[in-house]
Image: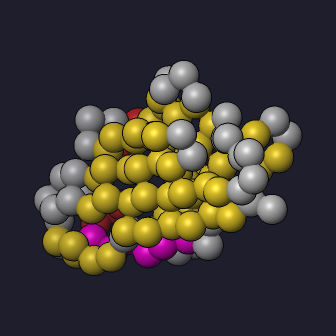
């Protein structure tokens, strides 16, 4: 059984920083791809950033240069700097291994102007 545990998030003023963390645990479980998605009210869920086991990363254009994704085995972090009000959303950790994928429960990030 795989467990996804997210931490971080909260409220911050524009220009501030937050750090999200997500740990995927399970007997012998080592994810291939770990990612963060976000969903704002009345909008579709979108990919924010992803990282594979070789540490190759992908970022949404809207966060390039501001967000950094890193991982250490089964833990992934998202450092978010220079936050903007449009970054306000529920952020979800997503973990993939083969065809299986797992989602975290989501953590709220609110950026006030």
Q: Position of residue 50 (x, y in %)?
A: 53, 38
| Residue at the outermost front position | 27
Part of the protein shown in magenta: 106-111
Residue under the image location 43 percent in, 58 percent down: 21
| Residue furthest out toward the right | 99
Look at the image and tell me in which quarter the N terminus lies. bottom right
Q: Position of residue 40 (x, y in %)?
A: 50, 68
Q: Is residue 80 visible?
A: yes
Q: Position of residue 88 (x, y in %)?
A: 38, 68
Q: Residue at x 65, y 57 (%)?
A: 25
Magenta span has 71?
no
* Residue 96, x across and y down, in percent: 71, 43
Quick check: 100 left or right of 90?
A: right
Residue 62 in the image: above or below residue 41: above
Q: Is residue 61 above or below residue 75?
A: above
Residue appearing at x 21%, y 59% in the figure: 17
Q: Which SS does the magenta portion mostly show? A: strand
Query: Residue shown at 71%/56% (left/top)?
Result: 26
* Residue 45 in view, yes or no: no
Question: Quadrant location of residue 13?
Answer: bottom left
């Amino acid at each position: 059984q795989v467990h996804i545990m997210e931490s971080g998030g909260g409220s911050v003023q524009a220009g501030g920083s937050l750090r999200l963390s997500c740990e995927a645990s399970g007997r012998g479980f080592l994810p291939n791809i770990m990612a963060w998605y976000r969903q704002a009210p009345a909008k579709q869920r979108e990919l924010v950033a992803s990282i594979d086991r070789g540490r190759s990363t992908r970022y949404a254009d809207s966060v390039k240069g501001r967000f950094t994704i890193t991982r250490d085995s089964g833990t992934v972090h998202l450092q978010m700097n220079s936050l903007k009000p449009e970054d306000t959303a529920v952020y979800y950790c997503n973990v993939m291994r083969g065809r299986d994928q797992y989602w975290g429960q989501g953590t709220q990030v609110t950026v006030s102007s």
